[in-house]
Structure formats: structure tokens, C-alpha cells
């Protein structure tokens, strides 16, 4: 039995409410899901929280998985939706306000990573550029697909992508 | 790109959240079952209706799925039948208030459902629809206690 | 002449007493008129009042329970009922006004006006078309109306407020959990969830006025499918939904884990400070 067949068998059990069958699915796909969350968010703790959100959402939506694509692909798309959805609402909370009208800017934490590798470089990108770069150059989504995810125009996506590549190259 | 292991095992947290949601869903089903049981009590027409006791101090968030649509149809049918049975007992203004309330709720449900065909995965719409169903059950309980 | 007229209308005054065990149940049915309940520190129940001519006053009591009713459904009474604070009261009325101070239990009126205050264990108040006003100190409170106005103040840990068309006005402090829901009523929320409370507000079509308490620490998320959000807080602006319909607004306030979530379908939302 291939891994894909095994996934399908487990999914069928999960669709009947078998929570024990969900754990092996988690174990098999956690690494890839976490990697995607980490690259999109740039923060290890936030990425861990997003992974939990993704698998809880996957449990709730499992009946919508029909088996036409691989479970991993379905989960991947779900992950992008969950992470981007949370990023959109987090971005709106850019000012942590005190109700005595003193606005205090809330800056996302910048982590400094000693490893010189792509992951570290990604974390130093601004959020918008990082998301577009990860989705296009790493995960293989098209400009139009990314534009639909983000609610932006494809032209904006291209501009962000150019910016990301330029910053990574310098 | 290579996979990256999470910094710690996330499964216990995931499992706990799923189990909590399952308990909420069970509470929502219990609420519906008790409402239907209350309707059965009314139909037997006991001399003094026992008030529907609260399930829990904070209301349970009703999870919407296809079962709720058929529950809603059943609640609506029972409510209309109860109004007919009570036609001579309720004051005209009370009956009118109940019918107006039912119409308000039904209009809301129709509009929300229509919007959900355009946005099937919108969580706010799902919650608003669940609340509208819950309002109909509440209206049934208000009417049931008016015996 | 007036005395004669009153004699024709009223029956002899009522007075009944009963010693009760702690936690005794008291059931009351009064169609019309007025019922005033007072929680006191004595371990007896005392009911005083008058019923209108043509009405029959029923009274049954033993150490663990009391039943008081006025028949028929067109009957009317004016009653003052003193109950031990530990008693649990269930009172139902058609149009009789219900007032209670320091009394726990369930209060129901078809078109009754219900007013409740004092310190209680818990209470549930409902009216199809009457107004319900609650200003108690209690662990939990549930208020429900169809068309009537629902007003909840006081200090309550867990509040559930629901109307169909009636306005909701909630100014409760000490909230750990609050659910406010209406189909088309106006909602005014000026409650205080502190730094840990969770508040959910759902309003299909009516407007929501959200006053953020000065002591609140946490986050606030507002979503409307077809309505508009107005923010009176500097530097906080709503965002248009990607589809072009609806708006949302998310902000962090002070420091804490409290959370206020507001959802409307087409009701407008106004967000402002205290």
C-alpha cells in the first residue's frame, strides 16, 4: 500500500469520527505543514500555533476531502488558507491601543538566526514579500492563485515577488 | 524544500482542542433534543408546564451542519402547530408578537443562507445562522411557557 | 362610595405564612396585577395582598415548597411575597408586573414588565413582549425577550442575553463570559470583561454600539457581512472585505486576554472608548 493509499484509508476512518486515525495523519504531515507555516510566518512559536489551527480545521473540514487529490495537497492548501487568514487579522492589530488615547506601536518580533540558510533569510523579509516568495518560488503557486489568496491584484504580487528576490540576492 | 519538525509534539494540544469542540457539538445536540422533548410535553398538555431548565450558564455555541436545517423545519412546524392549538388561549397581541418574531427569524435565515451560497466557508455567517436557529428554539420555549 | 366600590372589586386581604427549609421551591402564577418579591433573612415565607373580585386565590404549602396561584387566566392580584433568600422561585405571569429584590429563580411573563435587583444566586427572566430590567449581583444571569427591551446591569460573572426584536442594553461589570444575541434589536454593549472575559455579540440586522471599557485588556474583532463599521478610536480603522462587501476591524487594547467578538449580517457597528 502506498503512502497515498494509506492516507486515504485513514481519512475514511477520520470522516467516520475516528480521532485515533487522525494522529498518524498528523505525524506524517506535521513536518511539511510546520515548514510551510514557519516560512510564511517567520516565527517558530507562531508557526507551531498555526500548525495546531491547521489540523483542527482539517478535522472540522475532513468531510470535504473527496480523494481527487492527495491528502497532502489538500492539507497544503488548507494550511495556506489558515495562515494567511490569521496573518490578515494580525496585520490589522498593528497598533496596540490604550484607551487613554496613547497609541503604542506593536512591532512583530524579529528573530536572529545564526544559520546562514534560506529559512533564516526568509525570516528577515518583510511579511508581504516573504509570503509571496514562499508561495511562488517554494510552493509553486501561480501569481493569480497567490493574488486570490491575498485578495490583491496579480500586479501587486509580482511587485512583492521582485522585492523579495532582490532582498534575498543582496 | 525540506520538512522541518515542530519544536515540540503538537498532537496533545490538537487532540484536546478537537475533543473540546466535540463536547460543544454534543451540548448543541442536547439543546435541540431537549427543545424537541419540550415540544412533546406541550403536546401531551400537562396542567402546568415545567419551565425549560437551563442547560448551562453560558449558552452552548451551536455548530451548524445539515442536521440543523432539518431540525429548523421541525421546530418551525411544531411552533406553528402550537400557535394554532393556542389560538383561543393567547391574547391576539401575543399571538401577533410571536408570528412577527417568527417572520423576523425566517427572513434572517433566508438571507444568511443565500449569502452562504456565495461564501460557503465564512465562519461569521455560519455562526450567525446558528444563532438564528437558536432564536427559533428560544421562541418555541417562550411560547411553551405561556401555557 | 369609594369604600363601597373597593369592596365590590376586592376580596378580603390575604395573609399566609409558612416556615421553609433552605432551598425550598416557591411556585407562583398570577395572570394580571402586580407581584413584588422580597428576599429576606428569615426562614419563613410571607404572602400578603389582595385579589380582584371574581378571582380565586389558591395556596398550598409545606416545609419544602409553596404554590400560589390566582385563577382564572383573567384574574388579577396585587401581592407582596417575602421569601427566604435560599428559596428558588418560579413565577409566571400573563401581564402582571413582576418586581423582585434578592430573589433567585425563574421569572416569566407573556407581556409582563419584569424588574429584578439585589444579590442573588442565579436568575433567568423571560418575556415575550414585556421589558426585562436586571440589575443584580450574581454568578449568572439569563435574560430573554421577544419584542421587549432587555436591560442588564449590575455585577455578573456569566451573562446570556437574547432578544428577537427587542433592544439589548448591557452594562454589566465583572464579566467572565457574556453572550449577547438578537435578530433585529439594537445592541448597546458597555460591559466590562476586564483582562480575561470572553464576550460574543451576534446581531443579524440591528445596529451595535460597542463601548470598550477603560479597564479592558485584550482583543476586539468586529465583522459585518453587509453593514458598516465606524470607529471613533484614533488610528483604528475598519478594513473592507476582499470581496468588496462587508468590513472587519481588529484591535488590541491594553494588556490581557479578554476578547470581544462582534458579528453582524447587516447591522452597522460603532466602536468607541468608554
Image: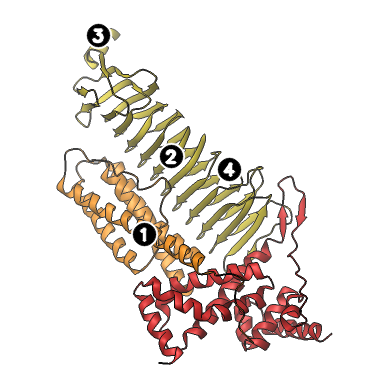
Chain colours: A red, B orange, C yellow
Residue pointed to by mark 3:
C4
> Could you tell me residue C74's position as x and y percent?
23, 30
Q: Estimate the spatial distance between the alpha carbons at disc 1 and disc 3, rounded to whole Å.
A: 53 Å
- Say whether disc 2 or disc 3 marks the residue closer to the N-terminus: 3
Above or below — where is B74 with respect to B94?
Answer: below
Q: Estimate the spatial distance between the alpha carbons at disc 2 and disc 4, rounded to whole Å.
A: 17 Å
* Picture quadrant where residue C10 is located: top left
Disc number for residue C141 = 2
Q: Nearer the viewer, residue A7 or B78?
A: A7
Residue at position x 33%, y 28% from top?
C87
Determine the residue located farthest toward the bottom in the rendered image: A1
Q: Disc 3 sits on a residue from what chain? A: C
Kindly state the secondary structure of the residue where label 1 is placed.
helix
Q: Are marks 1 and 4 on the same chain?
A: no
Residue pointed to by mark 1:
B106
Q: Disc 4 sits on a residue from what chain? A: C
* Picture quadrant where residue C247 is located: bottom right
Nearest to viewer (mark 1 / mark 3)? 1
Residue at position x 51%, y 58% from top?
C264
Mark 4 neighbour class, 10 Å CA radius: few under 14, some 14 to 19, many 20 or more: many
Residue B89 visible to an observer of this rendering: yes
Residue pointed to by mark 4:
C190
Amino acid at each position: 500500500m502506498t503512502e497515498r493509499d494509506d492516507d486515504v484509508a485513514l481519512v475514511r476512518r477520520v470522516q467516520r469520527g475516528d480521532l485515533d486515525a487522525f494522529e498518524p495523519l498528523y505525524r506524517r504531515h506535521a513536518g511539511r505543514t510546520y515548514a510551510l507555516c514557519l516560512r510564511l510566518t517567520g516565527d517558530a512559536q507562531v508557526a507551531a500555533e498555526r500548525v495546531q489551527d491547521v489540523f483542527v480545521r482539517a478535522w472540522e473540514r475532513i468531510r470535504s476531502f473527496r480523494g481527487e487529490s492527495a491528502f497532502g495537497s489538500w492539507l497544503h492548501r488548507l494550511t495556506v488558507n489558515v495562515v494567511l487568514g490569521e496573518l490578515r487579522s494580525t496585520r490589522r492589530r498593528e497598533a496596540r491601543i490604550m484607551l487613554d488615547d496613547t497609541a503604542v506601536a506593536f512591532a512583530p518580533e524579529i528573530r536572529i538566526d545564526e544559520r546562514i540558510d534560506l529559512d533564516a533569510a526568509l525570516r528577515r523579509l518583510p511579511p508581504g514579500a516573504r509570503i509571496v516568495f514562499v508561495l511562488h518560488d517554494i510552493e509553486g503557486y501561480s501569481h493569480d492563485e497567490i493574488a486570490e489568496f491575498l485578495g490583491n491584484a496579480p500586479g501587486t504580487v509580482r511587485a512583492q515577488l521582485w522585492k523579495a528576490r532582490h532582498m534575498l540576492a543582496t | 524544500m525540506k520538512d522541518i519538525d515542530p519544536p515540540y509534539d503538537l498532537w496533545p494540544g490538537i487532540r484536546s482542542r478537537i475533543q473540546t469542540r466535540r463536547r460543544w457539538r454534543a451540548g448543541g445536540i442536547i439543546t435541540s433534543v431537549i427543545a424537541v422533548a419540550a415540544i412533546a410535553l406541550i403536546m401531551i398538555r400537562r396542567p402546568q408546564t415545567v419551565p425549560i431548565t437551563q442547560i448551562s450558564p453560558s449558552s452552548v455555541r451551536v455548530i451548524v451542519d445539515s442536521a440543523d436545517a432539518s431540525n429548523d423545519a421541525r421546530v418551525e412546524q411544531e411552533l406553528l402547530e402550537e400557535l394554532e392549538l393556542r389560538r383561543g388561549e393567547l391574547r391576539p397581541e401575543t399571538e401577533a408578537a410571536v408570528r412577527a418574531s417568527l417572520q423576523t427569524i425566517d427572513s434572517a435565515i433566508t438571507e444568511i443562507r443565500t449569502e452562504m451560497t456565495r461564501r460557503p466557508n465564512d465562519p461569521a455567517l455560519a455562526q450567525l445562522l446558528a444563532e438564528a436557529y437558536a432564536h427559533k428554539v428560544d421562541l418555541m420555549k417562550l411560547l411553551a411557557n405561556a401555557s | 362610595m369609594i369604600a363601597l366600590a373597593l369592596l365590590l372589586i376586592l376580596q378580603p386581604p390575604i395573609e399566609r405564612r409558612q416556615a421553609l427549609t433552605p432551598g425550598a421551591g416557591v411556585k407562583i402564577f398570577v395572570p394580571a396585577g402586580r407581584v413584588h418579591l422580597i428576599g429576606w433573612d428569615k426562614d419563613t415565607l410571607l404572602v400578603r395582598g389582595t385579589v380582584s373580585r371574581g378571582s380565586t386565590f389558591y395556596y398550598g404549602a409545606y416545609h419544602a415548597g409553596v404554590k400560589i396561584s390566582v385563577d382564572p387566566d383573567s384574574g388579577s392580584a396585587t401581592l407582596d411575597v417575602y421569601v427566604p433568600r435560599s428559596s428558588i422561585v418560579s413565577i409566571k405571569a400573563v401581564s402582571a408586573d413582576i418586581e423582585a429584590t434578592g430573589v433567585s429563580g425563574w421569572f416569566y411573563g407573556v407581556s409582563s414588565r419584569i424588574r429584578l435587583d439585589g444579590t442573588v444566586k442565579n436568575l433567568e427572566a423571560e418575556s415575550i413582549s414585556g421589558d426585562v430590567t436586571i440589575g443584580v449581583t450574581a454568578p449568572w444571569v439569563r435574560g430573554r425577550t421577544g419584542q421587549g427591551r432587555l436591560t442588564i446591569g449590575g455585577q455578573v460573572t456569566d451573562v446570556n442575553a437574547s432578544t428577537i426584536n427587542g433592544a439589548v442594553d448591557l452594562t454589566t461589570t465583572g464579566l467572565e463570559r457574556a453572550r449577547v444575541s438578537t435578530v433585529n434589536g439594537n445592541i448597546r454593549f458597555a460591559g466590562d470583561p476586564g483582562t480575561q472575559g470572553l464576550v460574543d455579540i451576534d446581531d443579524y440586522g440591528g445596529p451595535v454600539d460597542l463601548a470598550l471599557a477603560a479597564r479592558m485588556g485584550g482583543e476586539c474583532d468586529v465583522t459585518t457581512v453587509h453593514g458598516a463599521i465606524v470607529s471613533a478610536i484614533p488610528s483604528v480603522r475598519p478594513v473592507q472585505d476582499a470581496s468588496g462587501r462587508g468590513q472587519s476591524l481588529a484591535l488590541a487594547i491594553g494588556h490581557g486576554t479578554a476578547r470581544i467578538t462582534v458579528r453582524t449580517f447587516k447591522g452597522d457597528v460603532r466602536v468607541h472608548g468608554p
